[in-house]
Image (tube, grey):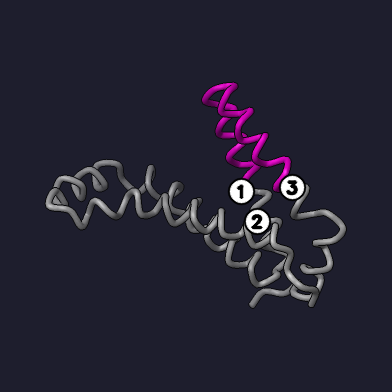
Amino acid sequence: MAQRHRSIAVIAWIFIAVGTAGLLKDLWPLLSPNAASQLAKLKADGLADLGPAWTSRLLAILGGVGLLRGYNWARWLLVVWMVFHIGLSALHSPGELLVHAAIFIPILYLLFRRSTTSYFDGANTLP
């Protein structure tokens, strides 16, 4: 397998950090003195609201770890993840859409440029 480019590692760790931060944002308050009220809030939000958000965050972490390990499916997972978020941001505001698109374009380039493709060629299978 070819050596991992620094840009791939940076992208992977950004996705891992974003996913982890999102999960911690919801779970960290459960360790505070107001844990009972936070738990009540989580129960009130329900699985219909929390399930998709936590799934998205876990997929970001999974994709980041997969990138670090050189799995080709991981870069496709993160592309789909970003396209999904661009679609969501289109429903919110034009500014949010532009920010997500501005983030997505360099990520797409860095993940699929010719010099990084060889890194993903050696690990095309699931672990």
Say which residue appears at 61% left-offset and 35% top-offset: 100
Other residues around mark 3 within 10 Å, as few (<14) / some (14–19) / many (≥20)? some
Q: Return the residue found at the far top.
A: 94
Say which residue appears at 67% left-offset and 34% top-offset: 101
- Residue bearing mark 1: 81
Say which residue appears at 70% left-offset and 70% top-offset: 70
Q: Amino acid at mark 1?
A: Trp
Q: Quadrant of residue 112?
A: bottom right
Question: Is 125 left or right of 121, judged from the image as shown?
Answer: left
Question: Is 105 left or right of 51, judged from the image as shown?
Answer: right
Q: Amino acid at mark 2?
A: Leu
- Residue bearing mark 2: 77
Question: How far across and down, in percent of the image, does residue 2 sit?
Answer: 80, 74
- Residue bearing mark 3: 108
Magenta span: 82-108
Q: In terms of sequence position, does the residue under pointer 1 or pointer 3 come before the other?
A: 1
Check the image and report above or below for 71 versus 29. below
Tell me if residue 98 is in the magenta stretch. Answer: yes
